[in-house]
Amino acid sequence: MYSKAFRALMVQKMTDPEGPSPVSLADDIGVSRSSLYRWVSEADTLDIAVNSEPPSFTESKQRLSNMKRPQDWSAEEKLAAVLEAASLSEEEFGAFLRSRGLHDALLQQWRYQMLVGLEPKPAKRIETKRIQELEKELRRKDKALAETAALLVLKKKPGKSGGTKRTTDRARGSPDCH
């Protein structure tokens, strides 16, 4: 999972007398302590010069930043890697992948995610929102219309609204009410 260069750098850090403790190194880079100890014991088979001169701080920091686990990369770093990889020839591309500890499928996935993120939002969402607004307005107007209709019905039927018969008879022009 981790590249040979990344493991070599971690072995150098662990074997450096002034380097961090295995516990803090494991916590900092997100690798288990057992993996770190195994890498040190396998240093001979990995052709790692354990006692070689440790890299300078800035060089070490630069190499470590290039060797991060893919899930720890920021969006900016992913974008930069995708753009840089797109401009490389096939031979340079392979070296690029090895130096960063990446796989071609991962770069393709990042590229796809970026392209999907750049696509405009579909108009369907805008239309759906407009439809919801219109339906809300229609419901409001239906309620107002129903209320107005109820008031008109009540005005047309004064007898049922609690009025007396005499008032009702006058309205009809009855001869009893003089």
Image: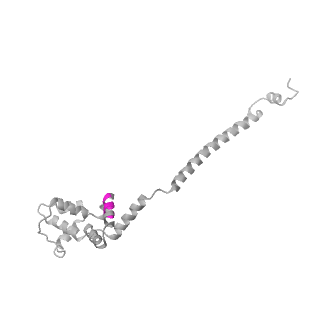
Q: Who is closer to the viewer here, 159 or 171?
A: 171
Q: Who is closer to the viewer here, 90 or 56?
A: 90
Colour setup of the view = one colour
Is 15 positioned to the left or the right of 88 in the image?
A: left
Image x and y of residue 126, in percent: 52, 52
Rendered position, 19 above or below 42: above
Q: Quadrant of the N terminus?
A: bottom left
Which residue sits furthest bottom?
A: 45
Image x and y of residue 102, in percent: 30, 68
Q: Who is closer to the viewer here, 116 or 34?
A: 116
Magenta part of the chain: 76-82
- Quadrant of the rendered structure where residue 167 is? top right
Q: Residue at x 33, y 60 (%)?
A: 79
Is 24 positioned to the left or the right of 131 in the image?
A: left
Which residue sits furthest top?
A: 178
Count of numbered labels shown in the rendering: 0
Q: Residue at x 61, y 45 (%)?
A: 139
Q: Who is closer to the viewer here, 53 or 84?
A: 84
**Would you say the magenta stretch is mainly helix, strand or loop?**
helix
Q: Is residue 77 magenta?
A: yes
Q: Residue at x 72, y 36 (%)?
A: 152
Residue 84 in view in this figure: yes
Q: Quadrant of the C terminus?
A: top right
Residue 1 in view in this figure: no
Image x and y of residue 19, in percent: 14, 61
Image x and y of residue 78, in percent: 32, 61
